[in-house]
Image (cartoon, helix red, strand yellow):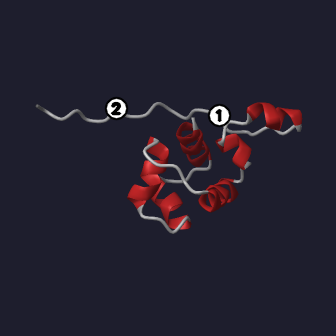
Amino acid sequence: MFNDRLRSARISKGLTLQKMADRLDLALRTYQNYESGDREPHYDMLVQIADILDIPTDFLLERDSYLESLGVSVDVPPEGPPRHPKPQKNR
């Protein structure tokens, strides 16, 4: 999924959530929503993200067969390390 690939690429580049948000001139929560899958970026933001992470937009959009047809490989695992589970609210 987009959010998993985004997170994996950010981690592989050694960037924190805050550093990514700062480079994109976004609020931290807005960027966190991209990685959690609660929100997706608009086209121009997608391009900025890919430029910062030095990866093709097609990688983020899971167009692996298209990239393979061009002979392009991306040195980023499709999924990063496991996420921490969200704390559950007491009822």
* Disc 1: which residue: 77
Q: What crowding class fits label 1: few (fewer than 14 Cα within 10 Å), some (14-19), or many (20 or more)?
A: few
Q: Quadrant of residue 30?
A: bottom left
Residue 4 in the image: x percent, y percent? 54, 37
Q: Quadrant of the N terminus?
A: top right
Q: Residue furthest bottom?
A: 25
Q: What amino acid type should be assigned to the residue bearing mark 2?
A: Pro
Residue at (43%, 51%) from the top-left corner? 32
Q: Quadrant of residue 24?
A: bottom right
Check disc 1 and report its element: helix, strand or loop: loop
Q: Is residue 87 left or right of 46 when viewed as pictured? A: left
Check disc 2 and report its element: helix, strand or loop: loop
Q: Is residue 78 above or below residue 18?
A: above
Residue 38 in the image: x percent, y percent? 42, 44
Q: Is residue 84 left or right of 40 when viewed as pictured? A: left
> Dots 1 and 2: beta carbons under 8 Å?
no
Question: What mark, if any, has residue 30 been given in the picture?
Answer: none
Front in this rendered view, residue 58 or 10: 58
Residue 66 in the image: x percent, y percent? 81, 36
Alpha carbon of mark 1 to alpha carbon of mark 2: how far? 21 Å
Front in this rendered view, residue 22 or 60: 60
* Disc 2: which residue: 85
Residue 3 in the image: x percent, y percent? 53, 41
- Considering only order in the chain, which callout, 2 or 1, is on the residue closer to the N terminus? 1
Q: Quadrant of the C terminus?
A: top left
Q: What amino acid type should be assigned to the residue bearing mark 1?
A: Pro
Q: Residue furthest front?
A: 42
Residue at (63%, 33%) from the top-left corner? 78
Q: Is residue 34 left or right of 9 when viewed as pictured? A: left
Residue at (75%, 40%) from the top-left corner? 74
Front in this rendered view, residue 57 or 73: 57
Q: Is residue 28 left or right of 10 when viewed as pictured? A: left
